[in-house]
Image: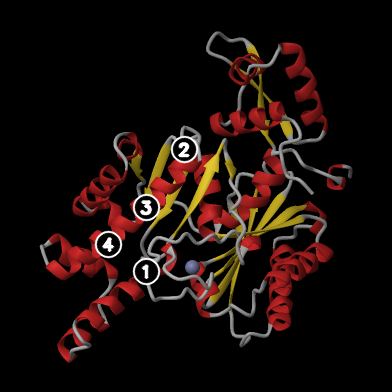
Amino acid sequence: MDFKSQNKNITNLLKFINQCGGSNKLEIAENIMVSPAALTKISKKLLGDNILVEKKYIDENNRKKNLLVINYERFYSMGVLIEENFTKVILTNLKNDILGELKFKNNYNGDFDEYLKALLEFIEKLAKENKVLPEKILGVGVVVTNEFIVKKSLDLFKEDRFLTLKKSIMDKFSGYVFVETEIRAEALYEAFLAPEYKDFFLVKYGEKRGSAIIIDNKLVNPAISHYRSMGTRHFIVEPNSDVYCEICKKKGCFDTMVSPKNIFEEILKENNYSTRIVDMYKNMSFEEFIKRAESGEITECKALRKVARYIAILMINHNNLLPLDTFLLSGRVFKSSLFLSYLKMYLQEFQLGEVHEKLIVLDKHVFREELVASFLPINYIFYNYHFQDNLEE
Ligand SMILES: [Zn+2]
């Protein structure tokens, strides 16, 4: 099943109406660039499907007007966020407003069937509690965080099990199931919320790390890798490293090299694991670490420079392969002008011109992270107009 847009005009129309909160036909036709005749046809279809509703209003010149608005309660979406210790399940309407939520502890000791049973129960319970019929649910978006993958679930979530997970959920609900890693799902939501960024590379560095590519509002699939089905593509940034990655089984991948765990470990190693150093870094938060670098501590500055270098390598390589016009940087570390100057220095060192001019540091997200999961079905089914049987009721 391919989840490309069924009709580009419908996609543009729904996105436009969502953005402005409702609009009249004249305005819509101008903005999405379709003929009035084509628009009449599309809107008739969407009104008939009860996706759009007409709202009558009187404008400033006392003329009766018709406003087209989205019927956000026409369908619902389920979002599942699997974190290291907990799984959160949310139910949203088509606007991605949360209508209900549940949270449960992941204590199944690697028993996939047990976990799946619990997950299905919670999804069912949430729908029931909110009196939403299964056929009203567009789909389920499952987002797996890196913390969960690394610490809990290398076995729990081997590739074929994703298929089992998808199938089991689809057996219970008529909707589709989408599985993504957190950073990729976040990039897709970012592209929706900020359509001014068309083709971008998102780098996240902080408590959670990773990168994702969006071209023309769509996620670019990773190249072949062990964990292709999860979209985890690890890029080698330090071929001479001795450290193997738990996920990709490669040496010197970006994800391992920039992890705070690896950075702290390198510092301890350089200092021959002296008790003083071990004690100092044992309980240090990454936030504290950045602050120490900013106040001029040499060890911390050196470590941050390394991270900046790896991020620069990652960015330069992707910039060579893809037509990216923007690099979005997300995380506390990019708010540090010291770190940003390191990053720009390396970018300029590796490649003359442009790349360092395309950096945009994102403000901290205001949305809750579970929303990136429930957005997946909304994006792939609702905005791409991929309704199947559930439209005919
Ligand atoms: Zn790796």
The type of residue carrying mark 3 is Ile
Q: Does label 1 or label 4 sit earlier along the sequence?
A: 1
Q: Residue at x 58, y 10 (%)?
A: 62
Q: Position of residue 168 (x, y in %)?
A: 79, 69
- Residue 313: mark: 3
Instruction: Kindly state the secondary structure of the residue where label 2 is placed.
Output: loop
Crowd around label 4: few <14 · some 14–19 · many ≥20 (10 Å): some
Quick one: 351 or 32, which is closer to the camera?
351
Q: Look at label 2 and name its amino acid.
A: Leu
Residue 343 appears in the rendering: yes
User: What residue would you read off at disc 1?
Assistant: 240
The reply to whether the C-beta atoms of the residues labelled 1 and 2 are less than 8 Å apart is no
Going 55% across and 39% down the picture, which residue do you hit? 215
Q: Amino acid at mark 4?
A: Lys
Task: Tell me how far mark 1 sits from mark 2, CA to CA.
Answer: 29 Å
Q: CA distance from mark 1 to mark 4?
A: 14 Å
User: Which sits earlier in the primary sequence, circle 1 or circle 2?
Assistant: 1
Secondary structure beneath disc 1? loop
Labelled pair 4, 3 in contact (Cβ < 8 Å): no
Q: Residues within 10 Å of mark 2 (few under 14, many from 20)?
A: many
State the separation of the CA atoms marked 4 and 3. Answer: 11 Å
Mark closer to the observer (3, 1): 1
Helix, strand or loop at mark 3: helix
Q: CA distance from mark 2 to mark 4?
A: 24 Å
Quickly name the residue at label 2: 324
Q: Earlier in the sequence, mark 2 or mark 4?
A: 4
Closest to the observer, 15 or 212: 212
Q: Earlier in the sequence, mark 3 or mark 1?
A: 1
Location of mark 4 (residue): 306
**Dot 4 or dot 3, earlier in sequence:** 4
